[in-house]
Amino acid sequence: MKKILFVLCICIVSIGLCAEIDQRKPFMDYYKNPNFSNVLKAVAFYGNQIELDSTNMMNKIYLLNLYNMEMSSILNDLIENADSLNPGEAFQTANMLLSLHQYEDAIKIYNRINAKTPNWSCPWRHKGEALLKLEDYQNSEISLRKAIETRKDHYDAYLMLAEVLYKQNKNKEAFDIFTEGSQYAGQTEASEETVYNQKQTDLLYINILKANKMKKELKKAEEKFSKKYKN
């Protein structure tokens, strides 16, 4: 009986090891030869495994690693070949880098787009955002003013410029730009992302009023927003 139990245990362990090897294989195939065919096979394999058993965390870990490795590879390829990208492709690449906080790389590509299509407002605005994140307020201001110059109703560019001016203690200019931009609220194109939600916009306005010591306007705004947000 003991011999039978021992053999059964060996079989179970062997099955477990085989299962682990099988689970690793698609990932290792991609790791050894990271081509598009192997990544598709691996994603399909782990996707199916997760559908069968969503509690198996290793399948999710393998899938996440695949995603990170492939995305890094594709991004590096795009960065290396940035000069050959058309403006639309370059813009999407720079935006991805911006979202990943790779601000310097994003700015380099935005610069190329600005040189090729100087009247396209969006790359100027996005470059202004990357420069703002780097706390390069002076160059961010230049870029955001260019975004507004090339498109008068670029609402997010006004808000971001107001923030950049506020951070430079150019408080009167910040108020003027915020006020000028407010007339374009709600006119953001459907294809554009909104950088500031309404609460962030209201908070920026409050801070600008405080910086300008506009007590009457500040009191009115605080009363309005306290009712809106309650806390």
Image: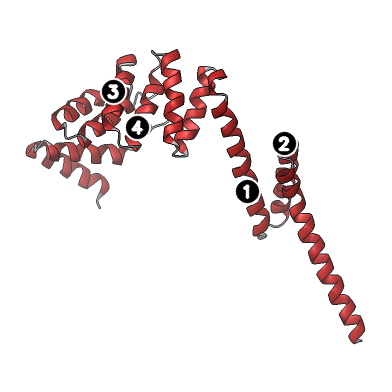
Q: Quadrant of residue 153?
A: top left
Q: Residues within 10 Å of mark 1 (few under 14, many from 20)?
A: few
Which of the two residues, 73 or 46, is positioned nearer the viewer here? 73
Upstream in sequence: badge 4 or badge 1: 1
Q: Is residue 20 left or right of residue 154?
A: right
Give the CA distance from mark 2 to mark 4: 35 Å
Say which mark, if any, is on residue 189: none
**Rendered view: 136 above or below 199:** above
Upstream in sequence: badge 2 or badge 4: 2
Give the CA distance from mark 2 to mark 1: 15 Å
Upstream in sequence: badge 2 or badge 1: 2
Give the CA distance from mark 4 to mark 1: 30 Å
Which of the two residues, 187 or 162, is positioned nearer the viewer here? 162
Q: Which residue is mark 2?
A: 35
Q: Which residue is mark 4?
A: 131
Q: Look at the image and tell me in which quarter the N terminus lies.
A: bottom right
Give the CA distance from mark 1 to mark 3: 39 Å
Q: Secondary structure at mark 2?
A: loop
Q: Please tell me which residue is depicted at 33% across the width and 22% down the height of the picture.
A: 154
Q: Which residue is mark 1?
A: 65
Q: Is residue 20 left or right of residue 151?
A: right
Q: Position of residue 104 (x, y in %)?
A: 42, 33
Upstream in sequence: badge 4 or badge 3: 4
